[in-house]
Image (cartoon, coloured by chain):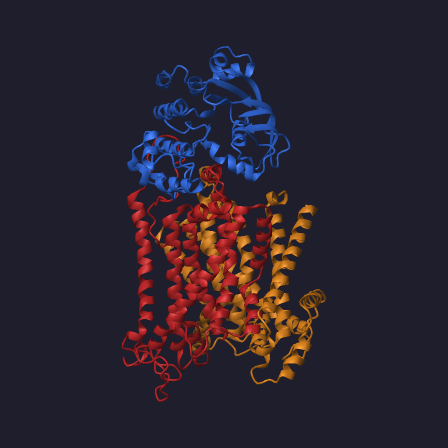
Chain colours: A blue, B orange, C red
Amino acid sequence: MRAVDVAIRHDGHDAPTVKGVSLEVGSGEIVGIVGESGSGKTTLAMAVAGLSPYTGAAVDGALEVVGCDLASADRRALKALRADVQVVFQNPHASLDPRQSVRAGFRELRTLQRERTSWISDEELMERVKLSPDLLDRYPHQLSGGQAQRVCIARALLMRPRLLIADEPTSGLDVSVQARVLELLLDVRDRDGIAILFISHDLAVVRLLCDRVYVMRFGEVVESGPTTRVLTEPQDPYTKALIEASPGRHGPGADRLRAVKA
Amino acid sequence: MIVFIARKVGGALVTFAVAITLAFLLSRMSGDPTANILGPFATPDQFESLRERLGLNDPLPVQFLDYLKSAFTADFGESLQYGQSNTQLILERLPNTIVLIVLAMAIAIGIGVPLGVVAATKEGSAWDRLASTVALLGQSMPVFWLGLMLILVFAVNLGLLPAGQDGSLKHVILPAVTLSMYPLAQIARLTRATMAEVLREPYIDAARARGLRSRRIIGVHALRNASMPVVTITALQAGLLLSGAVAVEYVFNYSGFGLLAIQAVEFRDYTLVQAVVAFGVLAFILLNLAVDLLYAVIDPRIRRA
Amino acid sequence: MSTPTAATEPVVDRLATEPGDGLATTTGAGVAAGSRAVLWLALPLAITAALCFLAPLLPLPDPNEQNLRNTLQPPVFAGGDWSHPLGTDKLGRDMLARLLHGGQLTFIIGVAGALVAVVPGALIGLAAGFARGKVDAVVSQLISAQLALPFVLIALPIIIARGQSIWVLLLVLGLTGWAPVARVVRAEAMSVRERQFILGLRAVGASGARIMFRHVLPNLAAVLVVLGTLQVGTAILIESALSFLGMGVVEPDMSWGSILASGQDILKQGWWVSTIPGIAITAVVLLVNLLGDALLVRYDPRKRQY
């Protein structure tokens, strides 16, 4: 996908939440967007996913996702985009219908996109995300946070997306569980060549997962580049401050996370 | 402030317009009333002349405009039963109903609030549970049945109620008590719930810690905060009260607006029913408007909304 | 309330909003207590209803059989005998039989009246809460306007135009009941709509209608059950009132309200004719209200209304 000088405004707000942002994700890349709460990263992610109309936001500027120009696309074109771009959200339990079992959820997705989802069975899909097929008949409240999140990833994978947007997918999980989910994301990129746009406020995780990173503040991109460069030699003062303030670089969990990338 | 009032009044006007339209549609959509008014033995000529008289042959928009006109000029023509002006009939009986409703509300608040407060202070105890169940009982009882039972006990067996109006206040007592039962129960339950919540708030403990006496705490601080929902519900109960008043007036043969309405239906007095409905709707909207404005006076936060 | 106050965890609504890997649990004891309350309340209601509907099979006299030599016989606890345990009315008809047979219509109209209000109310509330924007503005206005009309003012124009019949009764029940239901459902729908999984469904291309009916609505099931239950109580009270005024159920049909009406003018000599059906109505409505409250507590203790 590619965004050039994009601004996004929410209904009822005068000032745009995101302005003058340019962003690019090539196929097979894992790109991170970091920033604090309110930096506009989620808004940007929703726009890339084509979900802006449902969150009450309007997009201004050139935004092209998997070859489709979003800013000028109507609802129908956006629908065609659906399968190509999938989203995994922060709170796994809130992202699943509490009244649907895992299997029922998959079945519904298959009904919505019959051909596209016929490439894999439910059981194989569960194994793909390292979950036991026994969990298929469980309901969301019977799953742990990590399990639920992997179900969400499975649902995303089922649609064979070309771009996967992960909005703070591990923020609500324990550190040990986080590692497994991140392993899975790396695996997804390596095996299927799916590009990932990874939103986070956790620099430690971004450092280990992303090839390139964009740093956002107050709706603007203040710095961007290859992850190692940005995080070891930050140019922008805000980026510097962010790195200084970030915990966990030397903490116990960080070692496990480092093991993931190795 | 002015803007707020203007907005509320505007809203009330809109609601009135919509409600009146709904009422009109309801009566027109129910088909041709002449058959019901005249009964099965009337001749086609009689049907026709009645239809003409009631303006039912005019196209619907014309009928609607006529209805609106009557609503705004308060002229609903003459009653089919009495031959008198409908508006006059209504205005004669209305004060009686107002007295009844006001008295009933006074009883409901006067007994319901203290009951709720006491129950809240004893929250969770056997008394509380008993009070709550009794209150629920009050809401489950058919109001007309309660009226009959009260008549049975007080009038028939104890001779407390005079038959019909005797100009004194005595004949309002039983009807008012009957009518007050449902709102009393609702107010008691609501007061209890709100008070219980308020009493759990940290600032109550803080006040106690400062050494303020329990009674002062409850009376002044807690009550003021708990009064909001009660005021709201009072407005909402207006609708229930009118419906209840109709039944109560019927049971006690109390000559008010409600009894007039029932008789109008019983005698198929079409024009009177139209008038009654329009008045009723107007009264309701005005009452709700008054409460909205009162609310704003009590709670300054609302004014800025 | 007189329902058990053991802390009940809401089963269905337990979305793990806490971070961490904890498995969502349900406190078994609390849930069981809530279910017991529901059972203890539903059982007497079911038994009463069963008795009423099985009345024709019971060894009772014909409720319509008049016996003018046996009018106004008091019930067995007020000086009468067991041939007519609840006495007879002014036409000599057996009260026990009339009570049980009359219960049929009372229950039927109660349930039908509740459905007629809850189904349209839920659909309208759902549409308004989900669609938002102009649709919602219009519907909300309609709901307020409807709520501004006390039921009496709605019932009158219809009855005078149509006369009375069971259908008119149901129409009135529907028209007066839909608005409060719609208001609650609209609020609930709006809150479900904001939940993240709905956005996720949009991301996979689910249409608005699909989301509304297959995802929002089932999550409102608990609310609808409670509303429906409470509405049954309201419907019974309204039907009784209208029947009492002669505008609901009339001879030869019988409901508790109409039986009550037949006793108005003989209060002194035959007080049981009005008293007994009234007790029946109060008892059933009380049980229904308690049941509704128990269901509310069982499924969502946050919304208790004491």
Q: Nearer the viewer, residue B303 or B35?
A: B35
Residue C64's image quarter?
A: bottom left
At horizontal 36% and vertical 34% (from top left) the residue drawn is A120
Residue B267 seen in the current view: no
Count of labels in the image: 0
Residue B134 seen in the current view: yes
At horizontal 61% and vertical 67% (from top left) the residue drawn is B277
- On screen, residue B206 above or below C56: above
Residue C237's image quarter?
A: bottom left
Q: Nearer the viewer, residue C227 or B62?
A: B62
Q: Is residue C132 left or right of residue B141?
A: right
Q: Nearer the viewer, residue A240 or C230?
A: A240
Percent coordinates x, y for residue C68 in the rendering: 37, 88
Percent coordinates x, y for residue B109 in the rendering: 51, 58
Q: Is residue B207 left or right of residue A15?
A: left
Residue placed furthest toward the top: A233
- On screen, residue C240 above or below A44: below
Q: Is residue C188 left or right of residue A14?
A: left
Percent coordinates x, y for residue C259 in the rendering: 41, 76
Residue B138's image quarter?
A: bottom left
At horizontal 66% and vertical 80% (from top left) the residue drawn is B48
Percent coordinates x, y for residue B274 in the rendering: 63, 70
- On screen, residue B12 above or below C262: above
Q: Is residue C246 left or right of residue C32?
A: right
Residue placed furthest toward the bottom: C69
